[in-house]
Image (tube, rainbow, N blue to C red):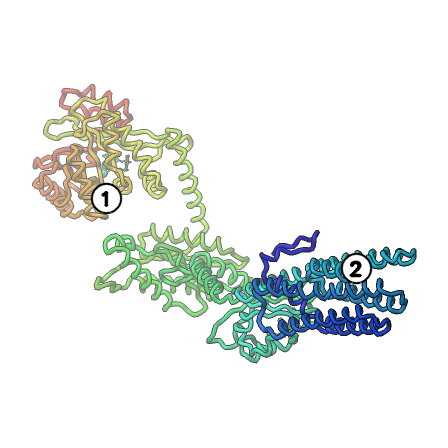
Amino acid sequence: MQFDSQSGEIDQKSSPNLSAALIDSLFEASGPLLAGIVFVAFAASLTALKTGQSMLWACVLFLIVAGAIRVFDLRRFSPRKSALTAEEAGKWQKRYRVGALIQAAAIGTWCSVALLSNDDAVVHLIALSVTTGIVAGGAARAYGRPSIFHQQAMLQFGPAVIALAVRGTPYYIAMAFVSAAFLLAVMQLSANLHRIFMRAVVARGREAALAGQFDTALNNMPHGLCMFRVDGQLAVMNHRFGAMMNLPPAITQSGTNARDIVAACVAAGSVSAASGELIVAAVESSQAKEIITSDPDMQRNRSLSWTTQPMADGGAVVLLEDITERRSAEAKITHLARYDDLTALPNRVHFRDEIERLLADSQHAASLSALLFIDLDQFKQVNDTLGHPCGDQLLCAVANRLREMLRPEDFVARFGGDEFVVFQQNISSPEDAASLARRIVERLSERYRIDNHLVEIGASVGIALTSPDGTSADTLLKNADMALYRAKADGRGTFCFFRDEMAATVEARRILELDLRKALANEEFELFYQPLVNLKSGKITTCEALLRWNHPVRGTVSPVDIIPVAEDMGLIVDLGRWILRRACMECMKWPEGVSVAVNFSPQQFHQRDVLSEIRYALEVSGLPAHRLEIEITESSLLHNTQLTHDILSQLHALGVRISLDDFGTGYSSLSYLHNFPMQKVKIDRSFLEGIDTDRPLTLLRGVARLSADLGMSVVVEGIETSEQLELISADGTVTEAQGYLFSRPVPAVRVRQLLNASHGNRMQDQLIVVSSRSLA
Ligand code: C2E
Ligand code: MG
Ligand code: MG
């Protein structure tokens, strides 16, 4: 709808409803119209009677005919029930215009005839006053169509103005002016009325549209909504609110009291009486507040949020939201964040919070509690051999056994991997904790049946006790962890209490780790080399690279102390890479017949790109693959058997040789010798202990012969005396020997000199000289 506020006119084509409303307004006031028709006919009759003029009687007739036409028209319009169409509105407007103009012409004619045809002052008065009244009444009635009214007024009053002027006397002329001004004023008045009417119509339309939109929004929103006036009475309630609260329709009507509505909610079982009181109080005091309620009927398990907000002009809005789903999602997230998904035990975060609380509670009671840190032994093997699903089942079984063993006041959690923690509260002595630890180790070491497999694992436990002057959760955990470390070092399957000196050991270890990290960057490492001598030729065939750490304060540190720490830190991969490259480059400086042997720790051997590492080291150094020997221990062969086999085969294909180091110290499984493609076995030095007695010698010779029969060369490590050398070389199965008798591990420069000096000679004799020199 377009409204021109200047002209006050409306573009009615764009609004058929509006034109219909305007036409209605014209026909609407039919009472005054009829009264006017009768009244003017009566007045005209009076003038005709007073003068007896036939012209005036003719005018009376004209007025009656014109009036009859309009009455007839009005009667035709009135009985309509439905709203006008645009077309009908146009038709009725035309009919109205014709009727109105005919009647206006009749009035104008009568008034001018009455003024001009005689000098009777009474007649003049009647004609002029009645016409004036009719025009004024018309302005108030026909404001709906100002254009029709203007024509009507001109026809009614225009002739009177002219007649007054035509009479020519000064007073009549003056009266003509006054009347003309009145005519203009009335026309203006009608235009103004029209404008006011139009504004009202447009405003009403806008309000109706807004109310419609508001209603749609209100009843389609997901929340329930109520608005209360200042006096606490309901102004608006949407359908959703009624539906959510299960309210009878009568209560949802405007004007109902907030207290009654809440009482109905309580009666419908949607909120409890206590919550209802809170809600009423919030509405009545117009406070901004959120109240969470749950259905009194627990089975419905519904949570609702009631938000009250004060309104600008007093009163309050209440928003009602069903937060059941949101709450259960939040509860799930909280559960996930605080519990272990697999075993449903509390996780690290939850455990820590909980014991922090328990410790704070028990601080004044001066009670003794223990924290037991449990680590499963051989769990990794189960995971690797039977697969993760079995590993998961095993962890659940462990969790169940732990749960069964504990008192209700104890608290068990899973810290991830195969680590479990128990908090044992209010014990009478440390022996209680020891006894629980013992039982845990025993119970967890009993067999498990997992998917038709019988599985056996062990457990180690570290115990930390609370102290009377208070211990924090973190300290307890740290101490128990240190004790666990010791329990594992003590051979696993056992428990250990935390002692203060452990902290010092751990600190020392921490410093060692820091130092190690720096050492690689600062190139503090060095490789020493120890020769392996062929017993038949007496020549050096290989030199084994052995790591040394020249620490500015610690002095020369043994690899026995470095390698395990580097393995734990994961530093071994970087360190191993450095050793391999350095050893290959060093070997390039030796006579062609001499190879280099490099020790590989299991972690290094199982790194993903071990093959490319080895290829790269050979490539950058230019060392032929057959001059490189990789020494691995039995533990490298334990895991991922297929993968290990593949790596060994590929190394073999590349031309690199593999030695099995320290044979006889581990599982000494002879099947390894048979199943894996290896070229050399190094029999550990421990075989030489008591070699002068028969049994060890027989054992050594047996292993040596078996290895030789499988096509491998045999090395005996740790030869220190000529007697030992004689004994092992007697039957001719041992191919090579290594030991202080020939040479201690020596720096690179020394080994180079050694190799050059002995080049072409029988080195066995020479080396004995060298070694006795270096021993000295
Ligand atoms: P291993 O590979 O069995 O090396 C032989 C060890 O025995 C060396 O000790 C060597 O000095 C020592 N040895 C040699 N002959 C005799 C002897 O006649 N009598 C005695 N009592 N000992 C002898 P080292 O250098 O202290 O190395 C110890 C272990 O550390 C090595 O045993 C090896 O397992 C590991 N290791 C050394 N260097 C490396 C390395 O670069 N990488 C890796 N992963 N491990 C290394
Ligand atoms: Mg070795
Ligand atoms: Mg060895």
User: Which residue is more in the foreground, 765 or 131?
Assistant: 131
Q: Is residue 289 visible?
A: no
Residue 521 in view here: yes
User: What element does badge 2 sit on?
Assistant: helix
Query: Where 596 sits versus 88, above or below?
Result: above
- Image spot of residue 57 (x, y percent): 79, 71
Q: Is residue 36 left or right of residue 311?
A: right
For the residue with label 2, is its CB less than 8 Å from the closest atom of ligand 1?
Answer: no
Picture quarter with ligand 3:
top left
Residue at 34% across / 50% down in the picture? 489
Q: Amino acid at mark 1?
A: Ser
Q: Hey, which residue is sitting farthest front in the picture?
A: 54
Are there few (<14), some (14-19), or many (20+) residues within 10 Å of tag 1? some
Q: Which residue is mark 2?
A: 159
Find residue 335 and report its horizontal and vertical position in percent.
44, 62
Q: Quick one: quadrant of the N terminus? A: bottom right
Q: Name the residue at 43% across, 49% down.
A: 502
Residue 308 vs residue 511: left or right? right
Task: Answer above or below: position of 318 versus 189.
Answer: below
**Horizontal and vertical percent for residue 319?**
58, 66
> Mark 2 Cα within 10 Å, few/some/many (few <14, many 20+)?
many
Q: Which residue is mark 1?
A: 636
Location of the C terminus by quadrant is top left
Label 2 or label 1, whichever comes before in sequence order? 2
Q: Position of residue 501 (x, y in %)?
A: 44, 48
Q: Nearer the viewer, mark 2 or mark 1?
A: 2
Q: Is residue 610 above or below residue 282?
A: above
Relative to 79, 244 lies left or right: left
Q: Distance between the Cα atoms at labels 2 and 1?
A: 127 Å
